[in-house]
């Protein structure tokens, strides 16, 4: 890494001006600037995973893969949250001891993530010893600083949400038997009045530091809509937070250090997982201050208020960014374990393929607003964009009828000069511009986790390239005419260059499909990073390393088409290649 950094022009310049001791400092700073630590929430194992969980994981995986593509050093953690009353109850209902129950569900999550190519670098379980040690240490730091005190909590509590509520957050409702109950206005879950002696965290002391942090870092909670929500919460009362439960009510958790009568509150326990993975308490410096959390909007308060307050209390840096996403709904209702209206992501990834599900979730999921799931939407989208549009383009440009030599053909600058005058028309120049600018557009959207916008932009360019091929109908050109042949080669060269850019940019979203595409083009693994995103160098008067190179072997259809929209009952089938190019 040091060698790589020293080669960068800006570092090199600085180093040449500095004394020996300072060189190490600069290298250290650069190294950390180029590091990312990305996390998903750890998932609560009171029931099997659903599509919403996969969505959080796919979003974070996309960012992690993109950062690796750009040459960053990226660590990516996910895992399972295994303590708390709900798990104690779920294990009891299943007739299992809690640990056996947790191990079973945790494996299901891991299997799902492995099946969908979630490339996590650490999978944490909160029942691991390394985590227990981190939580105990973290608690002791807060305790020693006088930020935790023994007190008495009295107020509304939702077991379902494992959270405490202010009176303003509670409303009236009727249960299934018509009995009047109190519910959380946010989640709709039942709440109960709770009064017990436990440990309190001085959350109220952090109201003003939290406001300063949010105001001084307007990009810290993204999208901005959620940043504003947190600011609004912080303008209301912020009472101290109960951070333990009486052991008699909750046994399944980490005991409070020095007090076996109390169990640490599940959210404090769970949030510390991010530190555990970073190496807390003694090896977290390299990763902790470059942390970025990807979370669903349902757990915003825990991540944007409680967590930063705990971290400030413990004297640790705060996360760089909290990326928030909205929810998948079914018939307009949040998909959730407790409502039971869940879509099984493993089943769906078998029907639509792992890449198919990844593409759908990232193309249709919008961070700012909820999105309703149906199988038909998935089939329609994948057929239109991956099978027909992208797959069709690759098929056209690599089919033996148009490309009998199976090579990356030559570009002819007389046919496509930089100034209009050859055989290219105005729209062709516009397409070239759009594809040239695409990497910058995609980078901006990947960076802010508006992946759907990046995919929209890529898809628009794929359509432009298909339009380019259609407009010039290379299959109608006369191969015996040398000028026609040169123009034909140029059309294919440009189209393959477009495909190379699309394949490279799509790697974080659909790794298997991109690999297939780039392999078919003959692009080697070391030629697939962001540094290789220089589009059409021959048009700029530079050499193109691919020109004249043999294409990779034909491994069949890029993405199989789903024959009809009734996706529930079907498996993917082989698509028919376009009749023109057989
Ligand atoms: N419907 C959903 N859409 C998008 N993401 C979701 C959805 N449900 C859960 N998630 C993701 O999973 C995280 C943890 O969710 P959790 O384990 O509480 O699932 P849940 O189905 O909401 O459970 P419960 O019904 O018990 O509240 C959320 O913060 C979010 O990141």
Image (cartoon, rainbow, N blue to C red):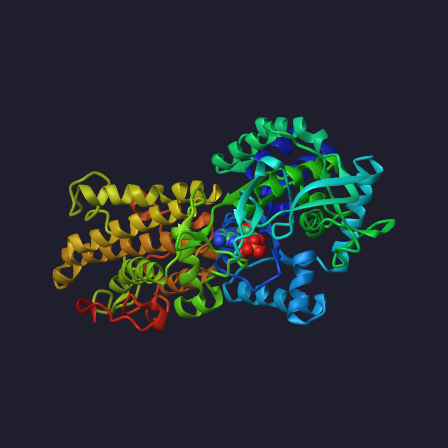
5 or 246: which is nearer to us?
246
> Above or below — where is 114 with respect to 167?
below
Residue at 40%, 50% in the rendered image: 371
Quadrant where the C terminus is found in the figure: bottom left
Q: Judge whether residue 429 can be spotted in this image.
A: yes
Please identify the quarter of the rendering in which residue 481 is found: bottom left
Residue at 71%, 66% in the rendered image: 98
524 or 573: which is nearer to us?
573
Residue at 64%, 51% in the rendered image: 159
Residue at 27%, 65% in the rendered image: 395
Q: Judge whether residue 72 can be spotted in this image.
A: no
23 or 450: which is nearer to us?
450
Please identify the quarter of the rendering in which residue 286 is found: top right
Instruction: Describe residue 210's horizontal placement relative to residue 279 as left or right.
Output: left
Instruction: Describe residue 147's horizontal placement relative to residue 444 as left or right.
Output: right
Residue 83 screen position, x and y as percent = 70, 57
Residue 5 screen position, x and y as percent = 60, 43
> Above or below — where is 485 with respect to 210?
below
Residue 123 screen position, x and y as percent = 64, 59
Residue 147 screen position, x and y as percent = 79, 35
323 or 330: which is nearer to us?
330
């Amino acid at each position: 890494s040091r060698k790589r950094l020293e080669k960068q022009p800006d570092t090199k310049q600085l180093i040449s001006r500095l004394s020996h001791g300072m060189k190490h400092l600069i290298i250290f700073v650069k190294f950390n600037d180029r590091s990312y630590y990305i996390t998903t929430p750890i998932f609560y194992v009171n029931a099997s995973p659903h599509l919403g969980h996969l969505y959080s994981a796919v979003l974070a995986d996309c960012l992690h893969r993109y950062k690796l593509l750009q040459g960053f050093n990226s660590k990516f953690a996910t895992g399972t949250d295994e303590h708390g009353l709900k798990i104690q109850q779920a294990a009891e209902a299943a007739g299992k001891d809690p640990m056996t129950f947790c191990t079973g569900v945790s494996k299901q999550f891991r299997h799902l993530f492995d099946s969908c190519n979630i490339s996590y670098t650490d999978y944490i379980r909160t029942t691991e010893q390394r985590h227990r040690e981190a939580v105990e240490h973290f608690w002791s730091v807060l305790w020693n600083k006088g930020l935790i005190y023994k007190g008495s909590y009295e107020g509304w509590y939702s077991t379902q949400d494992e959270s405490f509520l202010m009176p303003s957050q509670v409303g009236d409702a009727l249960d299934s038997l018509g009995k009047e109950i109190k519910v959380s206005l946010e989640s709709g879950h039942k709440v109960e009045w709770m009064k017990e002696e436990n440990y309190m965290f001085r959350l109220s002391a952090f109201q003003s530091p939290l406001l300063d942090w949010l105001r001084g870092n307007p990009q810290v909670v993204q999208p901005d809509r959620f940043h504003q929500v947190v600011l609004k919460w912080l303008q209301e009362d912020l009472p101290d937070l109960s951070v333990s439960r009486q052991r008699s009510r909750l046994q399944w958790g980490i005991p409070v250090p020095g007090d076996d009568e109390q169990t640490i509150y599940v959210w404090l326990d769970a949030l510390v997982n991010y530190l555990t993975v970073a190496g807390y308490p003694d090896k977290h410096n390299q990763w902790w201050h470059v942390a970025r959390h990807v979370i669903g909007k349902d757990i915003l308060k825990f991540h944007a208020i409680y967590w930063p307050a705990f971290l400030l209390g413990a004297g640790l840096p705060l996360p760089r960014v909290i990326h928030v996403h909205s929810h998948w709904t079914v018939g307009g209702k949040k998909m959730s374990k407790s409502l039971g209206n869940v879509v099984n992501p493993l089943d769906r990834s078998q029907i639509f393929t792992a890449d198919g599900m990844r593409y759908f979730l990232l193309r249709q999921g919008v961070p700012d607003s909820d999105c309703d799931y149906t199988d038909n939407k998935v089939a329609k989208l994948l057929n239109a964009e991956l099978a027909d549009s992208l797959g069709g383009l690759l098929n056209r440009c690599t089919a033996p009828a148009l490309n009998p030599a199976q090579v990356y053909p030559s570009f002819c600058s007389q046919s496509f000069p930089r100034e209009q005058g050859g055989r290219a028309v105005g729209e062709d120049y516009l397409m070239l511009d759009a594809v040239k600018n695409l990497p910058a557009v995609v980078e901006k959207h990947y960076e802010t986790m508006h992946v759907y916008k990046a995919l929209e932009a890529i898809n628009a360019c794929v359509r432009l390239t298909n339009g380019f091929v259609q407009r010039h109908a290379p299959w109608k050109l006369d191969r015996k005419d040398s000028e026609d042949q040169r123009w034909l080669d140029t059309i294919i060269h440009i189209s393959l260059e477009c495909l190379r850019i699309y394949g490279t940019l799509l790697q974080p979203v659909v790794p298997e499909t991109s690999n297939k595409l780039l392999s078919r083009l003959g692009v080697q693994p070391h030629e697939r990073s962001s540094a290789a995103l220089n589009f059409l160098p021959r048009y700029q008067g530079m050499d193109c390393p691919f020109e004249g190179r043999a294409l990779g072997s034909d491994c069949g259809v890029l993405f199989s088409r789903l024959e009809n929209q009734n996706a529930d009952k079907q498996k993917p089938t082989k698509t028919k290649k376009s009749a023109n190019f057989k």
